Amino acid sequence: MLLGDAITSCFIAAVFGSFAILVFRYVFYILTYERVRLYLRRRGPGYEMYTPIVTEEVWEGLGSTAIVALSSWALYAGHNVHCTPTNTSGCLYGWPNHHFPWTIDALFLLQLAWYTHCTTKHWFGLGRVQGLDAGLHHAFTLSLLAMSYTLQLLRVGLLVHWIFVLTNPLLSVSKLLHCLDVRPGKKAFFIFFTLCYLATRVLLVPIVLLPCTMHDVWHIPLDRWVAVTANGFLLLLYGLSLFWFGRLMGILLTGKLDSKPQMVVSVSETKRWQKQQ
C-alpha cells in the first residue's frame, strides 16, 4: 500500500487528499471567477448569473478529464491484463495474487480524494449543494473505490470506475454549452453525450461488468458477503445510471434544449464570490 496499510491510505486520501484538492479548487475560483463573470457579462444580458455554474463546470470538467485520461492510461498500459471492455477473463482470475505498480495505488487514492472533495465542496462554499441522487452516487462510488483498494481488487475496480466516469467530461461540456446557450451546438452535443452515456453506463454494465462481478467472483477465495455487498453497490450505481438516462431522454423528448438556460443558481453564492473580488 502506498501510504501504509489499506485503511490508513484510504483515510489519508479521503481527509488530507480531498482537503488539498479543495485548496486547489479555491485557488482556481479566485483566479477564474471574475474572468468568467466578465466574459458572461459581455456575452449578453442574463448570462452573468451563471458565473457560479460555469466556473464549477470548468473545474469539474478539467478534473474529470484528468481522471478519465489517467484511468484510460492505466487500463490500456498493460497493468490490467485481460481486464478491459473487450476481455474480462483476467479481472478476477488469480486474485489475491495480483501485483500492481505504485502508480495504480496512487490513482485509486486520487479518485478517493476527488470524490470526497466532490461530496464536501458545498460545505466550503465551493459549489452547488448536491441533490439526493448525486449524494447517493458519490457515496456508492466511494464505497466501491474503498472496497476495491482495501481488498486489492484493483483490476476489476479500475474497469468499473472507468466505465462509470468515461462520460463525465462530456457532461460538463454539455452543461457549459447549455449555460452559454450555444445554438445549434448545444443540442447536437447533448445528443452525442446521451449516446455515449447509453453505450457506456447503460449497455456496457450488463454486457461487460455484471457477468464478471456476478459470476466470476464466486470462483475466487473472496468472502461471500463481501462479494454480495460489492455487487449491491454496483447495482445501486447502475440503478442511478438508468434513472439519469431516463432524465436525459426526458430532456430530449420535452424540447427543453430549445429553450433558454434554466439551471438553479445560488444567489448567496454569487454575492459571496463577488465580494471576494
Image: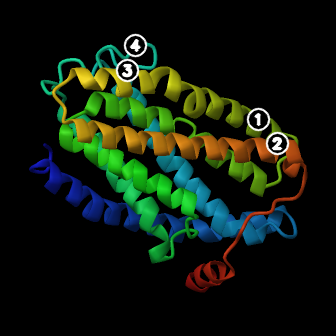
Q: Position of residue 39 (x, y in %)?
A: 74, 63
Counting residues from the start of the chain, the first of labels 2 and 3 encountered is 3
Counting residues from the start of the chain, the first of labels 3 and 1 encountered is 3
Give the number of the disc on residue 191.
Answer: 1
Secondary structure state at the residue bearing disc 1: helix
Q: Position of residue 267 (x, y in %)?
A: 69, 80
Which mark is nearer the camera, 1 or 2? 2
Query: Taking 263 as reference, is 103 above or below it?
Result: above
Counting residues from the start of the chain, the first of labels 1 and 2 encountered is 1
The alpha-carbon separation of the residues under discs 2 and 3 comes to 34 Å
Which mark is nearer the camera, 2 or 3? 2
Give the number of the disc on residue 87.
Answer: 4
- The kind of residue tagged 2 is Leu
Mark 1 neighbour density, 10 Å: few (under 14) some (14–19) many (20 or more): some
The alpha-carbon separation of the residues under discs 3 and 4 comes to 12 Å
Secondary structure state at the residue bearing disc 3: helix
The alpha-carbon separation of the residues under discs 3 and 1 comes to 28 Å
Residue 69 appearing in the image = no
Residue at (21, 59) in percent of width and height: 12
Dot 2 corresponds to which residue? 252
- The kind of residue tagged 1 is Ile
The alpha-carbon separation of the residues under discs 1 and 2 comes to 8 Å
